[in-house]
Image (cartoon, rainbow, N blue to C red):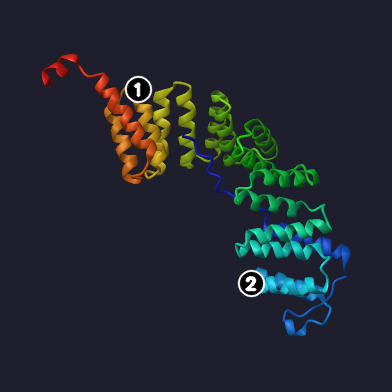
Amino acid sequence: MTENNYNESKYLTQEQQQKYYLEQLKNNQQETETDQQSENIKPGDYLGWYNRGNVLEDLGGYEEAFQAYEEALKIDPNQYEIWYNRGLVLGKLERCEDEIDSYDRSLAIEPNQYPAWYNRGIVLNDLGKHGEAVESFERALEIESNRYEAWYNKGKSLTHLERYQEALESFKQALNINSEDSQAWNNLGVVLVNLEYYEEALTAYDRALTIDSEKYYIWNNRGVALGHLGRYEEEVSSYNRALKLNPNYYQAWDNLGMALMNLKDYQEGIKACKKALKIKPDDYQAWQNWRKLLKKIEKNKDPKQSQKKQ
């Protein structure tokens, strides 16, 4: 059992986003001085409402920022930067479908926006719409092809779709740009295991662990690759490293139980199953493993002892 563990989102930083859109505004509109208070914003001053929304967003007032962007768009609905920022605050408010709609409105006005396509893909991925997410990341990469985070997240989406060969290429592209991300090496390893390239997967996991040896799930995934290669003692050691870092990681206890069965250490294998079930009593895999181990014990009993019991 391998784990992708895509916990680390690859969003653009707020500073990058602001820099991008402030540059666009400067190209389209002369700077206008506005007060932060809504009562001082002049009628028809969409930029005043826009700036107010930006300040409120920075302060964490997302609902108020949303309302400010709404006012700006009532005055001028053709400002794609405002639709984009409206999408950002909707994301903060966890209104994901509305967030996507806002990015779509922005992109309908100006399709050549890397951040909007990219963030749209992130939201679609989070919603489980991986096919649409792939399309968004591809549009983003048509605009800026050297963006690590877009290749990385495209690889994530393709992995969810079980399009492993394409995912492999995406993660390779990401790592060509940034070779120091342990998570990308881990995800590359996951794809390689699914493609049954076990030696290459082991190399990817080892590279990930040279960057960050504290990620328990990478030790677990490394153990899976070793198991496929029949290197069971090393497999056990890898699971033990994972469990030293996180003793409550029941998947590693599951995998350890099976590795010990392959080493014919059935009693220790059962102990591993018990550990997994103590953490997660409804762990189906642990119950299955326990059953297999009991069958192995029964099959390997001394026939003389079995006769004595009869």
Q: Percent position (x, y) of residue 11?
A: 65, 52
Residue 101 seen by the camera:
yes
Q: Nearer the viewer, mark 2 or mark 1?
A: 2
SS for tag 2? helix
User: Residue 227 at what x, y percent from top left?
Assistant: 45, 25
**Which of marks 1 and 2 precedes in the sequence?**
2
In percent of the image, x 66 and y 65: which residue is there? 89
Find residue 76 and report its image quarter. Answer: bottom right
Pointer 2 residue: 63
Q: Quadrant of residue 306?
A: top left
Residue 20 shows in this picture: no
- Residue pushed farthest top? 304
- Residue located at (69% from left, 57% from top): 100
Q: Is residue 301 left or right of residue 217?
A: left
Say which residue label 1 marks: 263
Question: How many C-alpha atoms fall within 10 Å of the one at disc 2: few (<14), some, or many (≥20)?
Answer: some
Numbered label attached to residue 180: none
In the image shown, does 277 or 174 lie closer to the viewer?
277
Q: x, y percentage for residue 290?
A: 31, 32
Q: Is residue 190 left or right of residue 239?
A: right
Quarter holding the C terminus?
Answer: top left
Q: Residue furthest bottom?
A: 39
| Relative vertical location of residue 294 with respect to residue 161 in this rendering, above or below | above
Residue depicted at x 44% and y 22%:
231
Label 1 SS: loop
Q: Nearer the viewer, residue 147 or 192?
A: 192
Query: What amino acid type should be assigned to the residue bearing mark 2?
Result: Glu
